[in-house]
Image (cartoon, rainbow, N blue to C red):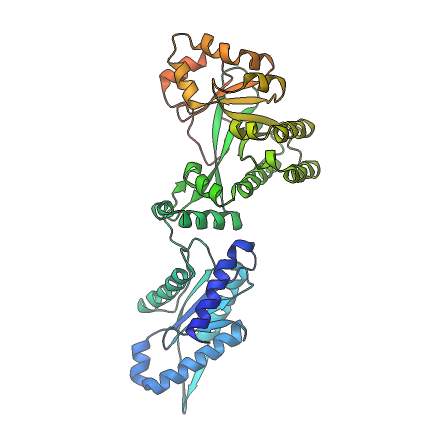
Amino acid sequence: MSHGSFLKALEQAFRSLSHKSNQGSGGLICVVIDHFTDLRDRLGYSGLVELDQQLADIVLDQLGKDSVSFSPRLMEVVVLVEHSGLDELKEQAERLFEALNHHDFPLGDDSVAITVSMTVCGLDMRFTSADRMLVEVIKGAESLSRAGGNQRVEIHPTLSAHQASKDDRNMLMLLMEALRKDELEVVFQLLLPATDDAIRSFQMLPRLRASGGSLLTATEFLPVAQRAGLLGTLDRWMLNHAIRIIDQRSENRGFRLFINQSGELLSDAKRREKLAHQLETGPDIRGQVVLDFQLTDVMANLKGAAAMLDLASKNGLQICFSRFDDHSNVDLLVERLRCDYLRLSPDLIHRFSEDDDPVQGLDGLTGPLRQKGIRLIAPMIEDATVMANLWKSGVDYLQGNMIQEAEQDLRLAD
């Protein structure tokens, strides 16, 4: 196959990643025969060409005649293996590695034994492009060979947090790959009750892991997800992950998880129907999940919000509306859209925390809501003075780094 045809096939496979699950995505295997200069001096170029052809024949025989391949140079071959999961791809590479290292290559009246260096890499959108992925796979194999060879390693993308933040495309690829491979991560932040509450409450927050182990916060990738139309996908992943956590800890029902959601469940009746079916047929999560919607999304989807509140009530979910401030429509929330929790806006919190009488100020605004049983959450508490003032203001929960920084483990006991 020509170089151009191979690159075109690789680009097409790379572009189709967003439409595939983690299974069967395929990948690249690169083989480099070690000790090139020694073999060249002993065999000459006529011998190298013959050895190179035998290498290509064995590789295609092992990986399938229909595999797409090309040779960057003599004694190297790269194969695009499609329709294989990563585990299967690694098994194929291992079998090929053993076959090549135990094969006698006939040349004239004699035969040659070789060792090879090999890299294997599943197709991965965290590479900035198909071409970049190909370069890293070939460079990896050549580097192994220069170091002595006879090794096989897996190549991973190296997209740092800084690179991911440089432009939307890198961030989007990082997010899509994490969703596709079910590798998004979450952290948990405690909501400290200001009154008695036997159930421990945690905000569940998504994180993206970049190369080097650093975690990107939601504020860094949510704008990109929104522009790409991925908020609904992220919503579903977060809810499904929460259900898995609750199901795995079914022996302990003494906790609840707050999960941020976009406006999709408010604007899309079919999505609400799917959620209702999921709740009816899935694990029992009654009383343990709080769906958290921005109040601006609620105001833009009044009928959908009312339907969502009804669905939640029937299925044991609770609802939180976030970013409530002194410009919000209190009467609407009291009379038509009565949620379980209201998360106050950070600006409102800091203004009230600086008042001489925060109790009177906050109660004047939220009194009618609290009389209806709606509980108040004060988020983003970063200062001890603010915390002290709010503790006596009548809010039900305090949240922020001053209380507890978000943690990767869900700690249900102190």
Q: Is residue 187 visible?
A: yes
Instruction: Indicate left or right for 309 with 293 as reference.
Output: right
**Residue plotted at (48% across, 27% down):** 190
Residue 172, placed above or below residue 40: above
Q: Position of residue 398 (x, y in %)?
A: 46, 21
Residue 105, placed above or below residue 138: below
Instruction: Indicate left or right for 3 with 338 as reference.
Output: left
Judging depth in this view, the residue of 154 and 203 nearest the camera is 203
Judging depth in this view, the residue of 5 and 397 nearest the camera is 5
Q: Is residue 412 visible?
A: no
Using the rendered view, name the quadrant where residue 245 is placed: top right
**Residue plotted at (45% across, 75% down):** 100
**Residue plotted at (44% across, 68% down):** 7
**Residue plotted at (45% across, 77% down):** 56
Q: Position of residue 96 (x, y in %)?
A: 49, 71
Q: Position of residue 155 (x, y in %)?
A: 41, 59
